[in-house]
Image: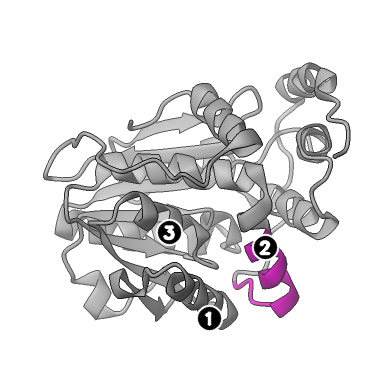
Amino acid sequence: MGIRPLWRVPGIVVRERLHSPGRERIPEPMVMDDAESVVHFHAGGAANPGMQAVYDLCARAIDALLPPGGRLLDLGIGSGRALSTVLRRRPDVHAVGVDLAPNMLATARELFVSEGLEARVELVQADITALPKSLADAKWDAVSCMWTLHQLPDFDVLDAALRQIAAVQRDSGAALWLSDFARLKDPSACPAMLQCVDPDSPMGLRQDAIASEAAAFTREELSAHILAAGLGGLHSGHATPLPYLQAYWMFGSRGKHAPTGRQDSALDGRTRREASLLRWGFTAKPF
């Protein structure tokens, strides 16, 4: 295991705070479906403590938002790791996962079968900006969108996605969980932080994380567009000491619920520590 030069973290944080705003966003392709990229991303989700910590945070949040026996609509499911963490935590939940990428959906399907979750999840290939009527008009207890919005190419597509989410939430009274990267002011901050906290991460996975942060919307941008889409009154929080992750949520019409999920026994060692630090440093969360 490589040396983690954590003594550099305070300097990275200070430079980010002092850096002038106005960094240009560098969009990624909307559909991530290259076979090699899917393999790297999926493998990273199984082995990378930082990714697993984010999945754990999202699962705990959705656990607090979903009532017993709830139905979850997950938009931008990717290879299924995040939703799998939710379903393993909450064996009473059924979900529909939506994504545009065939290779991602195929990988997610294999994952759910291998984990014995296939009976509780349906996968649909669709655009999250224009859901099929069968999904848009259905009743949901919660809607989630995890690590997906940064893939959207521009503000027009972001607005279309958020308006679709707002319409589903409004019509069904669902709880809502939106989480994603947040673009930092300093373009060197994300690469430098990854080198400090995760020096052993495979280069392909690290490059993907750097590209995703560069493609993300800032907290100011995303919060403004969320409000413009009609999603007023959302709670929000972000990671500290480096605000590279952001989250927004609301409780559904059935009110707030005490989390009922079981802790994932797969979290141990460094992964457990990373998850605890992420939760502790997040400025606000629904649990």
Which mark is nearer the camera, 2 or 1? 2
Q: Residues within 10 Å of mark 2 (few under 14, many from 20)?
A: some
Q: Residues within 10 Å of mark 3 (few under 14, many from 20)?
A: many
Which residue has dot 1 on it?
106
Looking at the image, is 128 positioned above or below residue 254?
A: below
Of callouts 2 and 3, the N-terminal one:
2
In this picture, residue 11 sits left or right of residue 100: right
- Residue shown at the point (75%, 19%) measured from the top left: 18
Looking at the image, is 167 positioned above or below residue 113?
A: above
Instruction: Determine if residue 31 is in view.
Output: yes
Amino acid type, label 3? Leu
Q: Secondary structure at mark 2?
A: helix
- Structural distance between the alpha carbons of marks 2 and 3: 15 Å
- Residue shown at the point (75%, 56%) measured from the top left: 205
Which residue has dot 3 on it?
83
In this picture, residue 19 sits left or right of residue 249: right
Q: Say which mark, if any, is on residue 43.
A: 2
Of callouts 2 and 1, the N-terminal one:
2
Q: Which residues are magenta?
A: 31-43
12 or 158: nearer the viewer: 12
- Residue shown at the point (68%, 36%) measured from the top left: 184
How are the colours assigned in the image?
Answer: one colour
